[in-house]
Image (cartoon, rainbow, N blue to C red):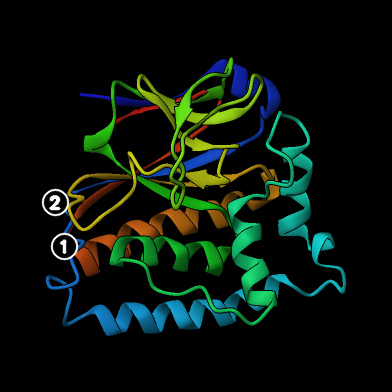
Amino acid sequence: MSKFVIEEPFWKLFPEAAIGVVVAENICNTEEGNEERRPDIIEMLKQCNEEAKKYLAAPVFSENPVIAVWRQAFQKFKTKKGVRCSIEALLKRVEKGKEVGAINPLVDLYNCISLRYGLPCGGEDIDTFAGNLRLTVTEGGDPFLALGDEEAEETLPGEVCYIDDAGAVCRCWNWRDGQRTMLTEDTRRAVLVIESVDPDRCNALNDAIGQLAGLISEYLGATARTEILTRKHPEVQL
């Protein structure tokens, strides 16, 4: 059985961070299997696009608190030029009136929670991992084929990444997922993460992770358990 472990090099950079985790099993993530409830998920995603506008009250996009806190976090480690946190990417679409659209049921549910709570969310297929999933500061050279790309790249020294024994899983913390571990219609077991670097948002993180687990159980027929990982509690069994 594999684990998800957040390693000490990460905690040295972000000692007050908290990572909410949902471990879900027996997921039905097919369009056919969710035909009856699929319109409800799509409607929820539409509503969450609207809800997310509350995080864009500042006249300057980068000065909105849920974006500014991540801009500051990304300055603490090595990144590819111009990369941004996943919640910033979603909110940029909302700001421009380009609705975050449907992908597959499980991805849509975590995007709903990301938009609703203004927190980065992501997910990976547990059965694709080679060894443990780790969130750490990489030494560089980890192979990575990003979603939508045709050519692989390598991680940079000093980059915060999710990695396993086969390479990078998600680069620049939560910027870009890889093809190897992506959530698909074949996914039956998944780990979903919700990330916070703002200690003042502990309640939001707790609510978000509980709600995500509930939605996955309700809509996708899964069993789901949750954990909040901190420096004092840095790992969970998958």
Q: On the image, which quarter does residue 236 sit in? A: top left
Which residue bears the numbered disc 1?
221
Callout 2: few (<14), some (14-19), or many (20+) C-alpha neighbours within 10 Å? some
Instruction: Say what amino acid the circle numbered 1 marks.
Output: Gly
Q: Is 194 or 214 nearer to us in this picture?
A: 194
Which percent across, then down, holds residue 194?
49, 48
> Is residue 13 toward the left or the right of residue 235 in the image?
right
Task: Locate the C terminus and report the quarter of the image it occupies.
Answer: top left
Q: Residue at x 69, y 78 (%)?
A: 96
> Which residue appears at 42% of the width and 42% of the height?
178
Can the viewer see residue 50?
yes
Residue at 33%, 39% in the rendered image: 180
Which secondary structure, mark 2?
loop
Could you say where residue 122 lies in the image, as x and y percent from the top left?
45, 50
Residue 161, x across and y down, in percent: 54, 30
Q: Quadrant of the N terminus?
A: top left
Residue 185 vs residue 95: left or right?
left
Residue at (62% x, 71% y) in the render: 93
- In this view, the residue in front, 142 or 90, is 142
Q: Answer yes or no: do the residues labelled 2 and 1 have beta carbons within 8 Å?
A: yes
The image position of residue 192, as x and y in percent, is: 38, 47
- Is 170 situated above or below 215? above
In the image shown, does 127 or 51 lie closer to the viewer? Answer: 127
- Which residue is denoted by mark 2 in the rendering? 26
Q: Amino acid at mark 2?
A: Asn
N-terminal-most mark, 2 or 1: 2
The relative height of residue 118 versus residue 192 in the rendered view (above or below) is: below
Label number found at residue 20? none
Gap in angstroms between the C-alphas marked 2 and 1: 7 Å
Mark 1, Cα crowd under 10 Å, few <14 / some 14-19 / many 20+, is some
Residue sitting at the far right: 59
